[in-house]
Image (spheres, grey):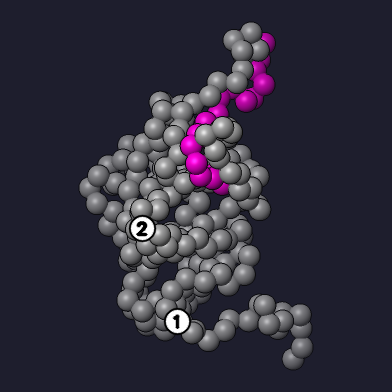
Amino acid sequence: MRSDLFKPEYQAQPPTAPGMTLQHAKAIKYVVNGECHARQGSMVAFRGNLQFEVKSQGVGNFLRRAVTGEGLPLMAVRGQGEVWLAHNSQNCFVMDLDQPGEALSINGRNVLAFDPTLSYEIKMVGGAGMTGGGLFNCHFTGQGRIGLISDGEPIIIPVTAQAPVYVDTDAVVGWSANLHTSINRSQSMGSMLRGGSGEAMQLALQGDGFVIVQPSELKPPPGQ
């Protein structure tokens, strides 16, 4: 049998080492030897001896997610085998936290999977006040890999003390967690009274790092 479906880039390769790799632009492969953490319902295929269970997130994270609707519904994948993960055909990326002290602040809707060596906490975004989307983010620390999803190809924007960046809270994926955040109001009261521009407020990021933005302002459905 012959088909373009059998191109090498579409083929599942034998596992070489435990951990997370990019299968292709729309899926992540995780070779599990013990445990990994992933978004609930993101498994599209697996082989081997694996079990899928709801992952406890601790009382603090559970309460924050219950009250705010923000955060990440997690499952633990345990055993030995391979699992393929994806979400709504969104673009997938793998990031390494490989230096001590590195941290990422990521919107829960953009997390697909991560190594159990990473610590995870739902934190309020500093300076955001009660302004809606992006009020709480997932704060990752430690050393390991995290798989992210983006609704389209992302934009990575450097942030410096001299050049702060302003992002739509419905489009931002995440940022280096050392950045200072606040709310920027870019619309005058007169413009708001005339119906508004649709760009009244943004999240301002200052410091030394980067921010990841997706080319979409779609709000996540209830329950992420």
Q: Quadrant of the N terminus?
A: bottom right
Is residue 168 among what the camera can see?
Answer: no
| Mark toward the start of the polypeptide (2 vs 1) | 1
CB within 8 Å, label 2 to label 1:
no
Residue at image coords 56%, 32%: 162
Q: Of 43 and 115, which appears nearest the observer? A: 115
Asked whether residue 83 appears in the rendered view, the answer is: yes
Residue at the far front: name it: 162
Q: Position of residue 30 (x, y in %)?
A: 46, 73
Is 161 magenta? The answer is no
User: Which residue ends up furthest to the bottom in the rendered image?
Assistant: 1
Q: Residues within 10 Å of mark 1 (few under 14, many from 20)?
A: few
Note whether 162 is above or below 25 in the view shown. above
Q: Is residue 63 left or right of residue 40?
A: left
Give the residue at the far left of this rendering. 59
The image position of residue 78, as x and y in percent, is: 33, 73
Q: How many marks?
A: 2
Residue ID for mark 2: 100
Q: Nearer the viewer, residue 94 or 42?
A: 94
Q: Position of residue 136 (x, y in %)?
A: 40, 38
Q: CA distance from mark 2 to mark 1?
A: 23 Å
Position of 204 with respect to 53 (left or right) is right
Q: Residue at x 76, y 83 (%)?
A: 3
- Name the residue at 40% across, 51% down: 103
Q: Residue 63: x percent and y percent?
A: 27, 42
Kind of residue indicated by mark 1: Ala
Of tags 2 and 1, the one toward the viewer is 2
Left or right position of 55 against 190:
left
**Other residues around mark 2 within 10 Å, as few (<14) / some (14–19) / many (≥20):** few
Which residues are drawn in magenta?
Answer: 193-214
Give the residue type that dot 2 points to: Pro
Q: Which mark is residue 17?
A: 1
